[in-house]
Amino acid sequence: QDPALTLPKPPDDGFVRVRGARENNLRDVDVDVPRGSIVAFTGVSGSGKSSLAFGTIFAEAQRRFLESVAPYARRLIAQGNTPHVDSITGLPPAVALQQRRGAPSSRSTVGTLTTLSNSMRMLFSRAGTYPAGAARLESDSFSSNTAIGACPRCHGLGIAHTVTESSAVHDPSLSIRDGAITAWPGAWQGKNLRDVVSELGHDIDTPWRDLPKASRDWLISTDEQPVVEVTPQRDRVAKPYKGRFWSAKSYILHTLADSKSEMARNRALRFVDTGPCDLCGGSGHTQAALAVTFAGHTIADLNGMPLADLTEILRPTAELATATAAISSASSGEVTEVAVTIAADLLARIDVLSGLGLGYLSLARKTPTLSPGEMQRLRIATQLRSGLFGVVYVLDEPSAGLHPADAEPLLVVLEQLKASGNTVFVVEHNMDVVRSADWLVDVGPRAGSGGGDVLYSGPVGGLAEVEASITRPFLERDPDIRPQRPVPRPVAGCLELTGVTRHNLRDLDVEIPLGVLTVVTGVSGSGKSTLVSRVLADAVREGLRDRGSQAPVEPELDTDGVEPTETEATIVSNVTGLEKVDRLVRVDQRPIGRTPRSNLATYTGLFDAVRSTFAATPDAVSRGYDAGRFSFNVAGGRCDTCLGEGFVTVELLFLPGSYAACPTCDGARYNAETLEILYRGKTIADVLAMTVEVATAFLADVPAAARSLATLGDVGLGYLRLGQPATELSGGEAQRIKLATELQRARRGHTLYLLDEPTTGLHPADVRLLMTQLNRLVDSGNTVVLVEHDMDVAAAADWIIDMGPSGGDAGGRILAAGIPATVAEHPESRTAPYLAARLA
Ligand code: ADP
Ligand code: ADP
Ligand code: ZN
Ligand code: ZN
């Protein structure tokens, strides 16, 4: 018998008790939090909230879970993922819902992520209306993602590449001999094809446009592949050979489908028109599936419409009181009990999504196009239906991306999770959410080594007694901590866009004042990001390119960050005022690099100064070590075992790979000789291990480094280590690093800065720091445009553009534009009342 079963259990009084937590910056903290309640973790960015909630409590729950499913993995797991903590008692299993971008798989959709698609398929299979004589289809037939449900032409992708005369022939004045069929391969292959065509009796010396239509059509798109004996025309030496004909279309489609060469496939894409598959109309479904309807709509129709509209179609069925037929008739099951049951279930689940402000999404929307906040809310809503109870949900800022008007339903959902017997931990900065929690754990007081203590753990109201807490005044709405409103600044002209069309923006006209700080507000899905991150960015980038100005410098361009997949292009009929902008910078939350090789020091460029400083020490000079010797990215000075990474990857049988410190350099990244060089008593590895704050003092005599370090401190990142890998940084930290890099350039000018929800992940105290920096940019002549939900930020703006009135097709308009006081009085705007409250 397992001895553990016979040991007395510790008394269980309903608390999770953490003892001696030392993960990252935590200072041996003890904390008790009640189960079955909503617990908010607060503190400035870098204080240690995540280290406690995710790094300690969730990590330990996860470790225990893995251990229980695979006891023999104990030893392996113990190496990597054991949090530094003495003990945790009363800990239930935990589920973490963190903000992450959607899986890169382009087939994952809102419907598959939420599993609503399963129910939709069931609805059509069991309760759909079938054409006379058609057999009932099983539910997999309604998925474009299965072998039997995928459109045979596009394999379920919904898109088709077509090769047409205009896509394959770029200059119809050329003859075939001169290369009219641009899509054909070049060099000898192309020459062979021309010989084959000539042998087949086509005129290869007449300009393409003068050839008979029948010939042109055949050459472009036939599937036939005649083989002819070719006598080379020019090259007398070559022997006759058998040549196969490829039409432009078969050659290109063959290359796209079968070529192993990325370059060949990319070339081929230049000769295709990409559009919806004409067989399935872009839905990816089979004809048989598309012949089945529910309430007069196909499954493709229902998948493509906003969830809010879908509910209106399902509601009559869900509320049907007279569902009499026990089984469906041959042609329709729409009035059966099965239909009512499935429709009611769908309705209830979709209502939760709508409640979380996501009613504008469609089931077919691809998850890689969703924002991290939208993703997390989808996951939260899905959990409500999971039927799990007795677990701890650990959430990362669930209010991210939510308009204040939508915070209320979020709280309701969190309450529901609790009511089903769960515990909810939220790392949160939104004080409205924090106020409604049952319990508060405030971590701090400051970031990094200045934090790591639990200042308070108890009912929310009790924080009022804790003088040292930076959170306290914000929770209490102390009037002293309001962001100072700047003196209104004069507008320096205007950027005017007319006829803007993209996503839900339809023929919109918009004016962006220059030389001031503008905040774009509106409920989730109203079109803020589309306007700022897509339309404005595209229009200004295009404009700058046309003007032949030097390519705009965008910090994110030197990363390999990927744009979410996009199918739509921006249409703008006219732009004026572009001449007053000479540079565009998007400061977004995309990572500053995807490998641990890029870090804070390399990204900001301050590492160059550090390396030169080490290369200039007398020891380095006498040994002939140059700055390159101190790089961990090139051979020479770096550790040869880990190639400068500082760690090695350990592949664990069934677990994702995890990292262990390099056995040779023990994480230092450099070889022993390099580490013999000291600057003021420290090795280069020691410097990488310093926080920005410590390094500011240490490198005070190195002007280039000192400037970078000062700006990093100014944006509140003093707690980060110089060598902190890009992969360990949160989106908010990445964004502030980009901002600091910009600030350190400190140039006056007419740069347009675009930021999408820069306050995500920021404590209200950090928001104030950020605003100070943004105002500094504006005061030196630049323009800042941000998308924001934080009403303190909006209230402090020079100008507000409020979008709405709702999300999706019910949005996309500019409801109000003006100074905050004007927008606050708008009768229809959902932002107005919240703004008015802050201005009061
Ligand atoms: P918060 O959630 O309050 O913003 P974190 O718990 O993320 O703070 O970070 C607390 C401290 O631990 C910070 O100084 C941060 O730089 C550091 N830190 C975070 N993650 C790691 C890590 N993986 N390795 C080392 N230090 C880390
Ligand atoms: P907001 O920033 O105000 O939350 P968005 O600009 O993200 O709003 O979205 C506006 C509308 O455009 C919504 O209906 C949304 O579903 C749609 N949309 C946004 N991004 C995409 C995309 N990549 N593909 C398709 N539709 C999109
Ligand atoms: Zn198709
Ligand atoms: Zn090494």
Image (cartoon, rainbow, N blue to C red):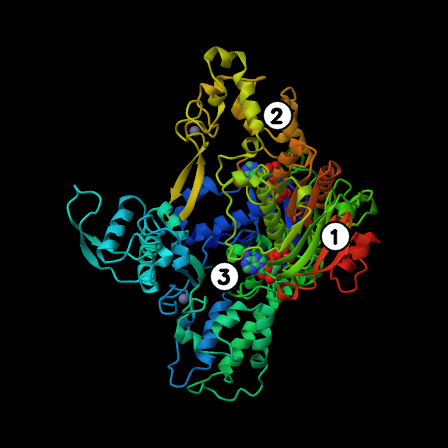
Mark 2 C-beta closer than 8 Å to ligand 1: no
Badge 2 or badge 1: first in the primary sequence: 2
The residue at the point 43 percent across, 82 percent down is 130
Amino acid on which disc 3 is placed: Thr
The residue at the point 46 percent across, 41 percent down is 80
Q: Horizontal and vertical percent for residue 504? A: 61, 62
| Crowdedness near tag 3: few (<14), some (14–19) or many (≥20) residues, C-alpha within 10 Å | many
Element carrying mark 3: loop
Badge 1 or badge 3: first in the primary sequence: 3
Badge 2 or badge 3: first in the primary sequence: 3
Element carrying mark 2: helix
Q: Horizontal and vertical percent for residue 487? A: 83, 42
Along the horizontal axis of the image, is 141 left or right of 615? left
Relative to the observer, which residue lies in front, 370 or 696? Answer: 370
Element carrying mark 1: strand
Can you identify the residue that label 1 sits on? 800
Relative to the observer, which residue lies in front, 544 or 131? Answer: 544
Q: CA distance from mark 2 to mark 1?
A: 37 Å
Q: Is residue 35 visible?
A: no
| Crowdedness near tag 2: few (<14), some (14–19) or many (≥20) residues, C-alpha within 10 Å | many
Q: Any mark on residue 109, and which?
A: 3
Name the residue at the left extreme.
239
Relative to the observer, which residue lies in front, 836 or 200? Answer: 200
Quadrant position of the C terminus in the picture: bottom right
Q: Is residue 616 visible?
A: yes
Q: Horizontal and vertical percent for residue 365? A: 52, 62
Q: CA distance from mark 1 to mark 3?
A: 33 Å
Q: CA distance from mark 2 to mark 3?
A: 45 Å
**Quadrant in which residue 807 is drawn:** bottom right
Amino acid on which disc 1 is placed: Ile
